[in-house]
Image (tube, rainbow, N blue to C red):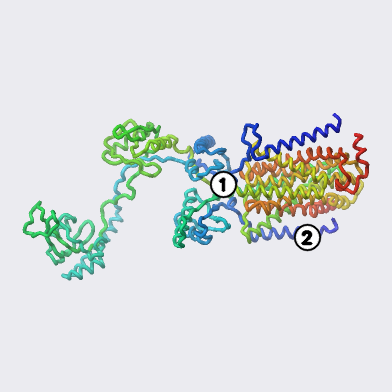
């Protein structure tokens, strides 16, 4: 396994670099949680009384209140409308604007039914809150990463005695964190692309997904490392670290794959049957955990080997 | 108790636990527990509103801030409770910039009304009539300049007209007259009797001109400069509007003269003080000085009235206001609208007033209540909000439920195909896990948000991880030649360190989510951590008991355990211990 590690390194570096490049090029498409703004989900009955372009026009040409840019998306059953952050009064005004627009349209189109606007969801986030959430998200990332790092270092604290080297435990911890950063940056990279081309937004549930990728992906890495620790003790007269690492990865390969597979099965069920509300949350987890499984087998152990070998 | 008895007893306990869970998972829950057993859905699923208010602390001393925020929170809580929303939550949140108040209203249907009630600040104001505003020197100058120009225009036109025909005059009136009422009609004012127009105009029309004559000078009135042409005249009897001979005309009689004329108007701008834009101007007196409000009945009309009692400062202000406004009106404004504007008869001392209006009794009571409740101790404004209708959540719950069941079936199929007999046991453990979790969600209760449900569904996939680690280890031990019983023990004890470490890393994540997450993400952290803890129990304890129970009964051949064949005779080995 270690023989081919240069290939894994190149593959992983390419993915991570690619992610950084798209992140710089496209940035992240921040949802209103982070960027501030308002989001409506409405239905218009009868449905013919308005389409996305009409609603956009009604809102953008309004002067009282002045709304500015409106992005309206037809969801099939209704419309998703994205605007700047609104006060509660403006919230009512916007609904009235749509109601009026639809009414006038219905009249000219000769529709008999009276127009009814049903508001299913409304969110408005002021810009300060958005900024706060952003810094909170970074804080959460930092806390989870450092928490895991300290825990891994603590859990493997006795491994130094085996190799009679100080700081071996910290190498375990650092490598685990490198693998995690790898997983997370690729997931974020994918979402930067999705955001650019499919208008997928980053919201607080995405942050939750990323944090969970951190907490969960490290499991596979820990299983392999745990085995390396065990094999180091069991084969204490084996001086070739490569043999021990290779054996450990081979020993735990099936369980690494199976633990990931069970969660992926559940995630697939959520992706295909869970409805739109959790789709991107599940997608972020699916990507992150898949990459995490790969990295714990093909990246973490070789990195640990190379770092330890050079000493 | 022999080991065999002990295992049988434990297996029974596990069975009982499963039954217990099933009882509570079943939608209604058992009857003997005197408590409604149901899943508590968060407001993203049940519908409702999450409102985040910023408090304006700029006028509050630093040391009083937290108590002011707390007082505001209490008033809001009272108002929210008055709405009759179940499970409403009002909490304060200190941030870097100040204090926020978070209001969660699950299941509230009229969100708009709720928001209005929470932020309700009845603004009671007393206003007096505004005085006319004198013109500034500049305004006076520019207006005089304008008027001069108008006069020149009028004089030039008069010259041009000379003794023009009636048609010509009418044509010019249509072109130049600034009297919108008559311009269209060529300046025609129709027949009028004396006294209808301002005196300057009247004199010219009735006395200084004859029929079919243009008056030779520009006539100035408060409206502007007029060119006047008298067209015709007659006399009529006021009684029957019939034309009458003018000879019968006399002072105070029924016969009056009527004159028809045309005019061309060049408007001027008044040099008098301007009428104020607003009819009312503020006084210092407002609801702040109110001691209490009550409902009384008007002794004359019997209508309900709202009585106001001011504090000392308020009484003094009210006295001053009434003193300087005798014979003028003082208006009482509520939320920017006049509700009553009585004329002041005399100075009022003693600091009490009444609002008479056309109130019904409930209206008067409501107003008095609002005035007594007063404004919130602190001004608040919504900085972020989340409102969702119930319909959206309902379909999301159904879909997540379906996804959960499908996910679970997939996991069960996978575990049984891959691990065979232990896989079945893992599936039973997983089922028990699910039942326990749902029971806990209902009993604690845990409020489930959409992400919380997603977290729970994911935990199904994670719960079997522990089993995977144990079973893989067991296989290894079996291949190494251990007895089934020893392999089970070894599998559990050796896999423990990996299980512990990986679950703790997940718990670290869940903990950070609970600590720092938004309310909806927080729910995800909570379900996740409960899931991790319970799964460690079911996957380790429950699986172990069930495995040993089966192993004791022979446990089938090596195939059932996913290996070629047992290397040692398991049955005999087990019977010895």
B188 left or right, relative to A181: left
Quick one: SS at disc 2? helix
Q: Residue at x 69, y 44 (%)?
A: B456
Q: Residue at x 26, y 54 (%)?
A: B271
| Circle 2 chain | A
**Relative height, residue B92 to residue A241 (above, below):** above
Q: Quadrant of the N terminus of chain B?
A: top right
Q: Quadrant of the C terminus of chain B?
A: top right
B175 left or right, relative to A292: left
Residues packed near mark 2 inside 10 Å, few (<14), some (14 to 19) or many (20 plus)? few
A240 left or right, relative to B536: right
Q: Which residue is mark 1?
A: B390
Q: Residue at x 19, y 56 (%)?
A: B197
**Relative height, residue B514 to residue B233 (above, below):** above
A213 left or right, relative to A110: right
Quick one: SS at disc 1? helix
Q: Which residue is mark 2?
A: A10
**Relative height, residue B365 to residue A32 (above, below):** above
């Amino acid at each position: 396994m270690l023989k081919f590690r240069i290939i894994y390194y190149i593959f992983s570096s390419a993915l991570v670099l690619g992610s950084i490049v798209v992140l710089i090029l496209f940035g992240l498409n921040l949802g209103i949680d982070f960027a501030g703004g308002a989001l409506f989900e409405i239905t218009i009955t009868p449905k013919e009384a308005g389409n996305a372009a009409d609603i956009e026009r009604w809102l953008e040409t309004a002067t009282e209140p002045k709304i500015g840019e409106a992005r309206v998306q037809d969801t099939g059953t209704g419309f998703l409308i994205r605007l700047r952050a609104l006060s509660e009064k403006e919230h009512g005004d916007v609904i009235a604007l749509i109601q009026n627009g639809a009414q006038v349209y219905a009249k000219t189109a000769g529709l008999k039914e009276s127009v009814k606007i049903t508001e299913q969801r409304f969110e408005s986030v002021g810009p300060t809150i958005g900024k706060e959430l952003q810094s909170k998200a970074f804080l959460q990332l930092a806390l989870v990463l450092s928490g895991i790092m300290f825990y891994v270092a603590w859990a493997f604290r006795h491994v130094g005695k085996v190799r009679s080297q100080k700081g071996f435990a910290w190498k375990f911890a650092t490598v685990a964190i490198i693998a995690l950063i790898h997983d997370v940056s690729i997931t974020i990279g994918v979402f930067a692309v999705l955001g650019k081309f499919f208008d997928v937004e980053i919201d607080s549930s995405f942050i939750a997904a990323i944090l969970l990728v951190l907490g969960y992906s490290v499991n596979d890495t820990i299983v392999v490392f745990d085995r390396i620790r065990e094999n180091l003790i069991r084969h204490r007269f084996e001086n070739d670290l490569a043999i021990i690492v290779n054996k450990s990865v081979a020993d735990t390969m099936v369980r690494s794959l199976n633990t990931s597979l069970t969660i992926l099965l559940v995630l697939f069920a959520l992706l295909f049957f869970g409805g739109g509300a959790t789709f991107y949350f599940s997608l972020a987890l699916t990507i992150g955990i898949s990459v995490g499984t790969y990295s714990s087998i093909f990246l973490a152990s070789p990195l640990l080997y190379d770092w330890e070998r050079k000493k | 108790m022999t080991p065999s008895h002990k295992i049988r007893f434990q297996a029974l306990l596990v069975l009982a636990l499963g039954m217990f869970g099933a009882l509570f998972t079943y939608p209604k829950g058992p009857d003997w527990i005197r408590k409604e057993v149901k899943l508590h859905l968060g407001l993203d699923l049940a519908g409702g509103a999450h409102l985040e208010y910023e408090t304006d602390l700029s006028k509050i001393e630093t040391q009083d801030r937290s108590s002011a925020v707390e007082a505001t929170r209490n008033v809001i809580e009272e108002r929210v409770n008055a709405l009759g929303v179940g499970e409403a939550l009002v909490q304060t949140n200190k941030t870097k910039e100040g204090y926020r108040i978070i209001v969660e209203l699950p299941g509230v249907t009229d969100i708009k009304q709720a928001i209005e009630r929470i932020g309700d600040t009845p603004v009671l104001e007393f206003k007096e009539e505004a005085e006319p505003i004198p013109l500034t020197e500049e305004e006076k100058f520019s207006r005089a300049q304008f008027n001069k120009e108008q006069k020149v225009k009028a004089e030039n036109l008069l010259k041009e007209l000379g003794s023009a025909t009636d048609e010509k005059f009418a044509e010019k009136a249509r072109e130049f007259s600034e009297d919108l009422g008559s311009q269209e009609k060529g300046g025609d004012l129709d027949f009028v009797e004396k006294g209808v127009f301002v005196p300057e105009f009247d004199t010219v029309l009735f006395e200084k001109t004859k029929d079919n004559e243009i008056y030779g000078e520009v006539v100035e009135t408060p409206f502007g400069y007029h060119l006047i042409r008298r067209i015709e005249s007659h006399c009529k009897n006021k009684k029957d509007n019939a034309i009458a001979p003018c000879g019968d005309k006399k002072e105070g009689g029924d016969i009056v003269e009527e004159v028809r004329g045309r005019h061309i108007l060049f408007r001027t701008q008044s040099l008098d003080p301007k009428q104020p834009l607003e009819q009312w101007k503020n006084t210092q007196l407002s609801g702040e000085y109110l001691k209490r409000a009550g409902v009384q009945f008007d002794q004359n009309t019997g209508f309900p009235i709202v009585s106001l009692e001011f504090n000392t400062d308020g009484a003094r202000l009210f006295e001053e206001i009434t003193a300087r406004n005798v014979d003028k009106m003082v208006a009482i404004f509520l939320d920017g609208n006049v509700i009553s504007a009585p004329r002041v008869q005399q100075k009022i001392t003693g600091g009490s007033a009444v609002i008479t209006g056309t109130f019904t009794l409930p209206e008067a009571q409501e107003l008095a209540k609002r005035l007594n409740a007063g404004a919130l101790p602190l001004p608040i404004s919504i900085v972020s909000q989340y409102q969702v209708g119930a319909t959206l959540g309902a379909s999301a719950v159904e879909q997540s439920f379906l996804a959960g069941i499908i996910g679970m079936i997939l996991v069960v199929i996978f575990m049984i195909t891959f691990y065979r007999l232990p896989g079945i046991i893992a599936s039973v453990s997983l089922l028990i896990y699910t039942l326990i979790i749902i029971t806990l969600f209902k009993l604690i209760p845990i409020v489930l948000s959409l992400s919380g449900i997603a977290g729970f569904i994911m935990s199904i996939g994670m719960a079997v991880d522990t089993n995977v680690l144990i079973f893989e280890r067991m296989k290894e031990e079996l291949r190494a030649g251990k007895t089934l019983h020893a392999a089970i023990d070894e599998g559990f004890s050796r896999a423990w360190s990996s299980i512990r470490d990986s679950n703790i890393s997940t718990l670290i994540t869940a903990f950070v989510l609970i600590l720092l997450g938004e309310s909806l993400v927080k729910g995800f952290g909570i379900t996740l951590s409960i899931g991790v803890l319970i799964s460690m129990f079911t996957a380790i304890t429950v699986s172990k008991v069930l495995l040993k129970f089966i192993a004791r009964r022979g446990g089938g051949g090596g195939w059932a355990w996913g290996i070629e064949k047992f290397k040692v005779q398991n049955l005999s080995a087990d019977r010895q211990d």
